Image (cartoon, grey):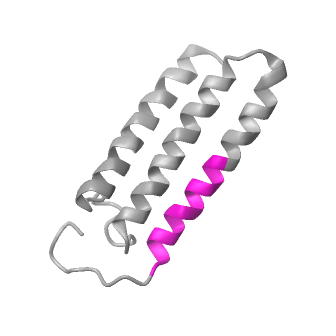
Amino acid sequence: MTPYIAVPLVLFALFYAASGVAAIARGWVLPMNRRQVRVPRIYGWGQLMVAFALCWQTAFGFSPSGTRASGTLIGSAILLAGLIVMAVGQCAGGKRKRGGTL
């Protein structure tokens, strides 16, 4: 993996992790996602999983070719699990308050 791909990917993962922490700690979700998200804390845990998976794949992208394939496969599984958790946060049946950031 080349650094000009890795650096923006890690920066995006950090932004996504910060958004996940905000969703877990304060129940705050980005304005473009507020309408779809019903349970912000579950959605935030999914975001943290996705951010971790992106960093995992970036770290194994620089490793020797023997461990690169297994690291990428594990990272893809974590990424898929994070996306599923985010979907659960969107589909869960919690009642949302109107007018707030929740």
Question: From the viewer's perspective, is residue 84 above or below residue 9?
Answer: below
> At 31% from the left edge and 84% from the top edge, which residue is drawn?
95
Instruction: Give the farthest residue toward the left.
Output: 99
Residue 88 falls inside the magenta stretch? yes
The image shows residue 20 at horizontal and vertical percentages of 37, 50
Q: Quadrant of the C terminus?
A: bottom left
Q: Nearer the viewer, residue 8 or 60?
A: 60
Question: From the viewer's perspective, is residue 57 above or below residue 74?
Answer: above
Number of marks present in the image shown: 0
The image shows residue 71 at horizontal and vertical percentages of 73, 32
Q: Quadrant of the N terminus?
A: top right
Instruction: Give the farthest residue toward the right.
Output: 66
Residue 74 falls inside the magenta stretch? no
> At 61% from the left edge and 48% from the top edge, which residue is drawn?
79
Using the rendered view, name the quadrant where residue 63 is placed.
Answer: top right
The image shows residue 69 at horizontal and vertical percentages of 80, 30
Instruction: Give the farthest residue toward the front.
Output: 25
Query: What secondary structure is the magenta-colored segment mainly?
Result: helix
Magenta region: 78-92
> At 61% from the left edge and 24% from the top edge, which residue is drawn?
59
Q: In the image, is 43 to the left or to the right of 98? A: right
Q: In the image, is 81 to the left or to the right of 71? A: left
Question: From the viewer's perspective, is residue 39 above or below residue 64?
Answer: below
